Amino acid sequence: MQRNGEPDSLDLLPLSPQLFHILVALADRDQHGYGIMRDVADRTGGKLRLSAGTLYGCMKRMLEQGLVIELRESERPAPSNDDERRRYYRLTQFGRKVAKAEATRLAELLEQARIYGLAPKRG
Amino acid sequence: MGWRRNAVRIYRTLLLAYPAEFRHQYGAEMERLFDDRSRSEPPVRLWLESLADIAITVPTEHLHTLAADLRYGGRMLASAPSFTVVALLVMALGIGATTAVFSLVNAVLLRSFPYGEPQGLVYLYSPNSQFQGTPDEMAPNDPDFYDWQRLSHSFTSLTMLKQRMSNFVHDGTVERVGSALVTGSFFETLEAKPQLGRAIEAEDDTPGRANVAVISDRLWHERFGGATDVIGRVLQINRKKYTVIGVMPKDFGYPFEGDIPYGMTGFKRTDLWLPVALSAKEKTDRTTFASNDATIGRLRPGVSVAQAQAELKSIESQLNSLYPPMWRGWTALVRPLVTTIVGPVQKMLWLLLGAVGCVLLIACSNVANLLLAKVATRRQEIGVRMALGAERTRLIRQMLTESLLLSCLGGSLGMLLAFAAVRLLVRLNPGNIPRFEQASVDSRVLFIAVVLSVMAGLLSGLAPTVAASRVSVNEILKQGGNKGTAGTSNRWRQTLVLIEVALSVILLGGAGLMIRSFIAVQAVNPGFSPSALTMRLSLDERYKTPEQRMAFFQGFMQAAQRVPGVLKVGAADVIPLDHRESVAAFEIKGYGKPRDMIDNRSVTSGYFGAIGLPLLHGRDFDDHDLKNNSVAIVNEAFAKTFFGASNPLGSQIRSGIGDLTGVPWITVIGVIANLRQTTLEEKPRPEVFRPYQAGLHGYAYLAFRLSVPPRVVIATLRNVLHDMDPALGLEDIHTMRDRMAEANARRRFQTVLLGGFAGLALLLACVGLYGLIAYSVKRRTAEIGVRMALGGSQRQVLGMVLREGLKVVGLGLFFGIVAALGTMRLIGAWLYEIGAGDPITFLSVAATLLLVAVCACLVPAIAATRVEPVTALRYE
């Protein structure tokens, strides 16, 4: 399903938990691989630890699908914050759309679980 | 800190397991990430997680790359449908044909015999050097067998069998079935277990208790509908009652035709096993020379064939003293059973596999050629991909994936083809190859087909891959998008076509030699009349005395003579092309005793007329001769060898086994024309024909000269026999033409197959040649256009293109003929009246190949002459 040369975000759903976490980790700032790994580990209380193979396998696929891009020299963080040896990644518009679609999907799922008393009530 | 450095080093080594492209892209990052984590995380947890991560993600990454390559390869194939169809067909033909021939090799040579540990089984023979001209593979006399069984220690078990055709009566119809009379140790020795009931055991093999039978799976299904209560049913076999005690599994039909050297011909497999149950007298009587048809032993573990033979020889040397002095000289010979059975066809089958392997090689080189042409047209694309950062290893992988995709798709088509081809091959069955009809596509054949597909893919992908990996980005960019010429790849392509032509020459040469031999054998004058009808009639044990038997045969022959359409009837102990030897020592009065043995045949009066052998001098036997047995007729070869120009009529000869002193002299009364007695190929040997009284033995071969088609007479003859004795049947009913076809069947099979492969090779080589020249013309369109614009004639262009093609063909022809002359001695044994370097054959091969090659080049060459200079320049 091509639309304006861009694949439909719904085609990629559901995302694997690892992929979704990476998208979330990139949602508010550009990061390098190690940063993403630490971010995910922090946010999940250490429950999800992305190992190198999994992380870069995901990054490769996300680059191919256009969910993220690799930053060019000119776009990298200020030299004081930059680690020259690392590659930095940024979420694309399309990546953001996919992440939103996945979040909506999860929210709907959670809502249904609530109706059946499988999840705590709101508030 | 040292341990951390080492840990990183180990991790870096482990990263080598990832696809190169992935590693080059992310390896350094992954290493860095590992290093970062190693600063803050406990080493054990880090390693456990990292190892698990590598174990999971390495295969995943490889699969992703493969999937991408396959998608890309699939798109490439789909974008060039004509290329894809040709390449797939070529691969399918090569792999399919090879798989089909392999299924034959598998059925006959590789698939295990339907009995336990066949490698431990041996045939035991008892040759006697006194009987020159007889084969060494003679089974021992019965008493010797029982003494071997009693005295030898080399075997865990010994058994013997006698082959018989039995009259099997079921539901009122008589069926002649191949049967074996076996000792109680037969099934134990072969380690063959019935699928139902029990096998024949020692206690069954005693006179009076031998009324039990084991039947084949075929009989069980065809005659009893596979009913499980078949055990205990009573069968009528040769007018005796037998109780079924067991049913053998589907594959078991030992002995099959061809399993026993000089075994009984006329039936393909054994369907019935009965106890031989010899009496105590028969087991010890050394005066009747009753021998069995095959003696089989199972070697004790650790005992070699040579050791077993040495032991049997020493036992036999003692047993010789039990024979009358003139009959001694028996010894022992032990041969492995498996090589004896498959030996005669082994070479032929491997040769056919080799030939079809050549076809596969040609197919691979053809596909390689097509792929090379594609690489040449894709150089730009490859160059651009490399300029954009594609790794060379990735490109190599991509090219190999493409050729593997082609070969595997072609291989799948080929397997379908093989299923059909195996059915066709089984129909071509020459009849005398054991287990041939059991050829099928089983798991081993499928496995080989898969291996062949992968190998074909790698082989055909090799040259294109090397060519693709040599593409230089700079060069491409310098050419600024011009369609470049690929000099190296063109040399590759020429070399490949050269190899194809050379391989085709070898196959064509082999096929040509076989075809010429086949034609020569077909043209042999066999001496007898091909239209003569022959059959075998056997009596059972109710006809006890020779007088009874002779009276029956006499009666039947007289009745047959009265059947409308029968012109002449005769009988003989052996008919031509039956492979049976019947030799004897002989002496000519006044000439001395030659060292050689002569073929000794016995025939009734009228036999020569019936089988169509012309009497050259003298007269035929008459009734008086049959009674007196004091005359003989010799063949032309005999007369020429021993009498030269003088007349043999009236001379005296005598023949027999051993010492001839005291044997009465008999007079030569006639000379008949030569005939091919054992095979069509073998030159006629001196033969002596003695008067024969049909019925002397329990059977005789009958020959008929007819004035009507055989089928008309056969039905009447069956009725005649039925009226005389409804329990008897006619067997082995064939015209001599059928027997000639059967004698020639293996040769025909080899020739047809080899011819087919050679034709296929020629076709594929021409496709290759056509592809090469067509591509070359396309590549040189501009050059041709310029030449023509500058005044070059169409003739010159035609000549230029043809020269290019014929240069490759000429070189291929040269190398092919040199290689063929070296390899043709492999088939030397199958050639008849021509040498392996037969000039007529090779000249014909060269002429055929050149003619076909010119045609293959002519099509693109003519296209080249039609090039319009303007179009050519625009093309540029």
Image: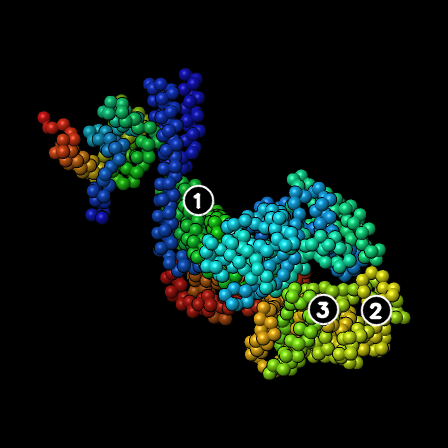
Can you tell which quarter of the image residue B788 is in? bottom left
Name the residue located 75 percent from the left edge and 55 percent from the top edge: B285
**Total number of numbered discs in the rendering:** 3
Query: As shown in the figure, which amino acid type bears the numbered disc 1?
Result: Ile
**Which residue is disc 1 drawn over?**
B396
Name which of mark 2 and mark 1 comes first in the sequence. Answer: 1
Co-location on one chain, circles 1 and 3: yes
Query: As shown in the figure, which amino acid type bears the numbered disc 2?
Result: Arg
Mark 1: give few (<14), some (14-19) or many (20+) Cα within 10 Å: some
Tell me where residue B651 appears, x and y as whole percent: 85, 75
Tell me where residue B213 appears, x and y as whole percent: 57, 55
Residues under labels 1 and 3: Cα distance? 83 Å
**Which residue is disc 3 drawn over?**
B546
Q: Is residue B2 left or right of residue B272?
A: left
**Which residue is disc 2 drawn over?**
B654
Can you tell which quarter of the image residue B266 is in? bottom right
